Image (spheres, rainbow, N blue to C red):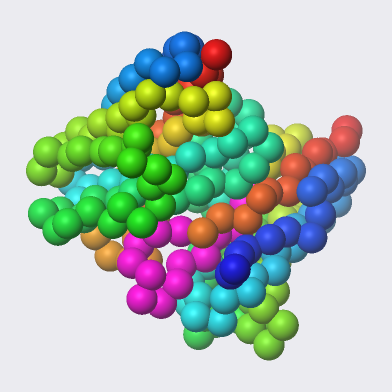
Amino acid sequence: GAGVSQSPSNKVTEKGKDVELRCDPISGHTALYWYRQRLGQGLEFLIYFQGNSAPDKSGLPSDRFSAERTGESVSTLTIQRTQQEDSAVYLCASSFGGRRETQYFGPGTRLLVL
Amino acid sequence: GESVGLHLPTLSVQEGDNSIINCAYSNSASDYFIWYKQESGKGPQFIIDIRSNMDKRQGQRVTVLLNKTVKHLSLQIAATQPGDSAVYFCAENLTGGGNKLTFGTGTQLKVEL
């Protein structure tokens, strides 16, 4: 399909383990975003990548969270030493580069930390 | 801190009626606002947006109104249908804040047959 895809769709892990979440943006989109959505709440911005510029990491909640993106392709969000409070849906979005360009979201990865 | 919030967590409407979902924002530096629809188990879907130099914008069955004086945003859905049942989020983009969006907590719209 032509939309944003994310994998895995669901992830159950044990406290203390590391997890890696993947996002495939829409082809041609230079900007890629990660958001977190806790149950029954709105989305919290985590990080965004714009082309070759330094990413905006201002939303990452702790140094256990990191993300990478190679060029204008896939991105991975890594959570180290997961905690129960990390349980949430992690949503990826992509857009063309402008500030007011529509962000298109993927279906999310549902992470449960036991 | 600055935030975007919604007045009503749940809104129930009869099929065919009009729906109005409200949103208050507190950051006067926001100049771009977006409404998203999120169905259960899916990612948010763009509905409509509006820039701060406008006070109204219309789409297909949807209208967004922006009142900068009281920092209030609303989404109107005409002739609400069962398929409109979802959680609706408003989001704002701050001037100078880059591309990131700040989302409200959401309103659950339930359409009753």
* Residue at image location 48% in from the left, 40% down from the top: A36
Res. B110 image quadrant? top right
Location of residue B111 in the rendering, given as x and y in whole percent from the top left corner: 82, 39
Vertical position of residue B17 compared to residue A71: above or below: below
Tell how many labels.
0
Residue B41 makes an appearance in the image = yes
Location of residue B23 in the rendering, given as x and y in whole percent from the top left corner: 70, 64
* Residue at image location 79% in from the left, 60% down from the top: B7
Q: Is residue B98 magenta?
A: yes
Q: Nearer the viewer, residue A83 or B51?
A: A83
Q: Nearer the viewer, residue A78 or B93?
A: A78
Vertical position of residue A4 compared to residue B45: above or below: above
Location of residue B76 in the rendering, given as x and y in whole percent from the top left corner: 72, 61
Left or right: A47 as drawn, with respect to B3: left
Q: Nearer the viewer, residue A59 or B93?
A: A59
Task: Tell me which segment is drawn in magenta.
Answer: B88-101
Name the quarter where the N terminus of chain A is drawn.
top left
* Residue at image location 73% in from the left, 59% down from the top: B6
Q: Nearer the viewer, residue A9 or A111?
A: A111
Q: Is residue A55 magenta?
A: no
Name the quarter where the C terminus of chain A is drawn.
top right
Residue A7 makes an appearance in the image = no
Left or right: B58 as drawn, with respect to A99: right
Residue lying furthest bottom: B69
Location of residue A66 in the rendering, given as x and y in whole percent from the top left corner: 29, 38
Left or right: A66 as drawn, with respect to B92: left
* Residue at image location 59% in from the left, 68% down from the top: B1
